[in-house]
Image: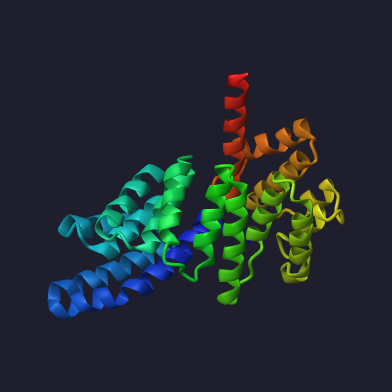
């Protein structure tokens, strides 16, 4: 499946725990109090992973009242706030981290996600660029960057970031499908029909096994499924949001703007807010409103 924010944050949490384990262990050896804080941090992260967000946030906040510079607690606080879709608060929390740890790639990516969901694409782009500055082997960081470029209508850079995301995912033995969709539609926006055709062919040859989602999307784009058939594969609100987004983008590329707008407007107003496609559709809707005002 795509990276709804819930899944993205869980992946981020796992990485953060690994990245800062040695840091926290060093604090633990320094004093018994640090050891106590370590236990509390671990318990708070366990609450976060189990979905008990309110309790986790209380624990992280209490730790920060005791020590405002507790990096692990600050990261936990930011992730809970992001999960609760309190994006402005999450942005502030991540921003505190990067002000003190300017090379913290995970925090830069989290800051970017918060800005992205606030439709602040300039800040999102800056954050994702900082997250990828040292060329980390992390496909999600580059995928996030690609989404931001796409929402900024910088289709050339979006396609490049999407290709980089695909490479990084593959290096980690992961399946990369959504970056291929970004690349495909970015190439269509640039009238690079042959490159788009090759991207789609590659995606069809490397799509998830057993026709798992979003395989039907690629089949639809290749002409193997009708619009109605594609919708029939949807099993949850995230997939429904994605399906209508890609139908809308396909119709848009075909010049069927009115039909495309009906799908993209549905995504912007009724779609699942936890998937990237919802923000993309909203950005398209806002751009078109501005264009109409300028006429």
Residue at x 66%, y 63% (from the top left corner)? 177
Q: Quadrant of the N terminus?
A: bottom right
Residue at x 70%, y 50% (from the top left corner)? 185
- Callout count: 0
Considering depth in this image, is 174 or 162 the residue closer to the camera? 162
Q: Is residue 127 left or right of residue 201?
A: left
Residue at x 61%, y 51% (from the top left corner)? 156
Q: Is residue 126 left or right of residue 267?
A: left
The part of the image, by quadrant, that contains residue 129 is: bottom left
Colour convention of the picture: rainbow
Question: Where 117 falls versus 221 (above or below)?
Answer: above
Considering depth in this image, is 177 or 244 the residue closer to the camera? 177
Q: Is residue 285 visible?
A: yes
Location of residue 26 in the rendering, given as x and y in whole percent from the top left corner = 21, 78
The part of the image, by quadrant, that contains residue 47 is: bottom left
Residue at x 59%, y 20% (from the top left corner)? 294
Considering depth in this image, is 68 or 174 the residue closer to the camera? 174
Considering depth in this image, is 19 or 74 the residue closer to the camera? 19
Q: Quadrant of the C terminus?
A: top right
Q: Is residue 153 left or right of residue 16?
A: right
Q: Is residue 274 visible?
A: no
Location of residue 154 in the rendering, given as x and y in whole percent from the top left corner = 58, 45
Location of residue 128 in the rendering, given as x and y in whole percent from the top left corner = 45, 55
Which residue reaches farthest bottom?
A: 29
The part of the image, by quadrant, that contains residue 252 is: top right
Q: Is residue 128 left or right of residue 244?
A: left
């Amino acid at each position: 499946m795509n990276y709804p924010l819930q899944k993205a944050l869980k992946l981020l949490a796992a990485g953060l725990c690994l990245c800062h384990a040695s840091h926290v262990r060093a604090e633990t050896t320094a004093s018994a109090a640090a050891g106590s804080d370590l236990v509390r941090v671990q318990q708070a992260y366990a609450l976060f992973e189990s979905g008990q967000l309110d309790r986790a946030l209380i624990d992280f906040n209490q730790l920060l009242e005791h020590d405002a510079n507790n990096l692990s607690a600050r990261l936990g606080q930011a992730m809970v706030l992001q999960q609760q879709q309190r994006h402005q608060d999450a942005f502030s929390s991540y921003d505190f981290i990067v002000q003190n740890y300017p090379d913290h790639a995970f925090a830069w990516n989290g800051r970017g996600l918060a800005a992205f969901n606030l439709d602040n694409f300039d800040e999102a782009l800056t954050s994702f660029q900082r997250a990828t500055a040292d060329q980390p082997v992390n496909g999600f960081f580059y995928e996030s960057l690609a989404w931001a470029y796409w929402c900024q209508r910088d289709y050339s850079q979006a396609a490049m970031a999407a290709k980089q995301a695909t490479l990084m995912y593959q290096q980690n033995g992961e399946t990369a499908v959504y970056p291929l969709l970004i690349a495909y539609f970015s190439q269509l926006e640039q009238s690079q029909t042959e490159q788009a055709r090759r991207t789609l062919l590659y995606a069809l040859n490397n799509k998830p096994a057993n026709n798992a989602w979003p395989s039907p999307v690629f089949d639809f784009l290749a002409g193997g499924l009708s619009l109605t058939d594609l919708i029939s594969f949807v099993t949850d609100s995230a997939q429904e949001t994605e399906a209508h987004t890609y139908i809308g983008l396909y119709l848009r590329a075909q010049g069927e703007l009115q039909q495309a707008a009906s799908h993209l407007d549905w995504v912007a107003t009724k779609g699942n807010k936890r998937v990237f496609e919802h923000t993309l559709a909203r950005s398209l809707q806002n751009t078109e409103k501005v264009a109409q005002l300028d006429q």
